[in-house]
Image (cartoon, rainbow, N blue to C red):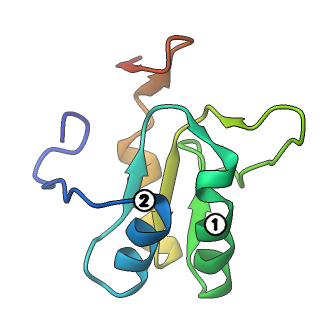
Amino acid sequence: SEFLPGKKPVFAGGSGYKALRVLKGEANAYVHVTKIKSWDVCAADAVVHAAGGKFTNLKGERLVYVKDDPMISGGLIAAADAESHAWYVEKLAPVQMTPSDGHKKK
C-alpha cells in the first residue's frame, strides 16, 4: 500500500494461492517486494503464464531460476493480463530492492 496508493492489500497464504486469486479475478495483482525462494514461486509462475498472465520481477522481466542460487531478489508482480501487469510495473518502478531483503523508494 506504501507504493500503490488507492490499492488495498489482500493478505493470503502462499504464492500459489495468491497467484490463483489473481487468475480468478479475486485480486488485481500479486506483488511481493522482498526476497523469496524460487521453489515458493516457480509453480505459480508456470500457472500464471500458462493462463495468459504475466509473472515477473518488479522490472517486468521474466524470472530466471538458478540452481545454485534459489533466491529471487528482484521482487514479484503477477497479473492476469499484460495491461494490468504493465500498470503495476510502472507504479512500482520507484521500488528498489536492498541487500537486507527489504525495499525502499529510489
Helix, strand or loop at label 1? It is: helix
Q: Which residue is mark 1?
A: 45
Residue 16: % across, % down = 49, 68
Crowding at mark 2 (Cα within 10 Å: few <14, some 14-19, many 20+): few
Quadrant of the rendered image containing residue 91: top left
Q: Circles 1 and 2: CB distance less than 8 Å?
A: no
Q: Earlier in the sequence, mark 1 or mark 2?
A: 2
Tell me the kind of residue under disc 2. Answer: Gly
Residue 67: % across, % down = 89, 42
From the viewer's perspective, is 4 left or right of 44?
Answer: left
Relative to 44, say whether 36 is above or below.
above
Quadrant of the rendered image containing residue 69: top right
Residue 98: % across, % down = 51, 15
Q: Nearer the viewer, residue 74 or 84?
A: 74
Crowding at mark 1 (Cα within 10 Å: few <14, some 14-19, many 20+): many
Kindly identify the residue that appears in the image at 43 percent across and 78 percent down: 20
Kindly identify the residue that appears in the image at 10 percent across and 52 percent down: 6
Helix, strand or loop at label 2? It is: loop
Kindly identify the residue that appears in the image at 60 percent across and 85 percent down: 52
Residue 7: % across, % down = 15, 55
Quadrant of the rendered image containing residue 51: bottom right
Kindly report the distance in space between the C-alpha atoms of the residues bearing marks 1 and 2.
Answer: 13 Å
Relative to 52, say whether 27 is above or below.
above
Q: Which residue is mark 2?
A: 14
- Quarter of the N terminus within the rendering: top left
From the viewer's perspective, is 29 left or right of 80?
Answer: left
- Quarter of the C terminus within the rendering: top left
Q: Nearer the viewer, residue 17 or 1?
A: 17
Question: How many numbered discs, if any?
Answer: 2
Q: Nearer the viewer, mark 1 or mark 2?
A: 2
Tell me the kind of residue under disc 1. Answer: Asp
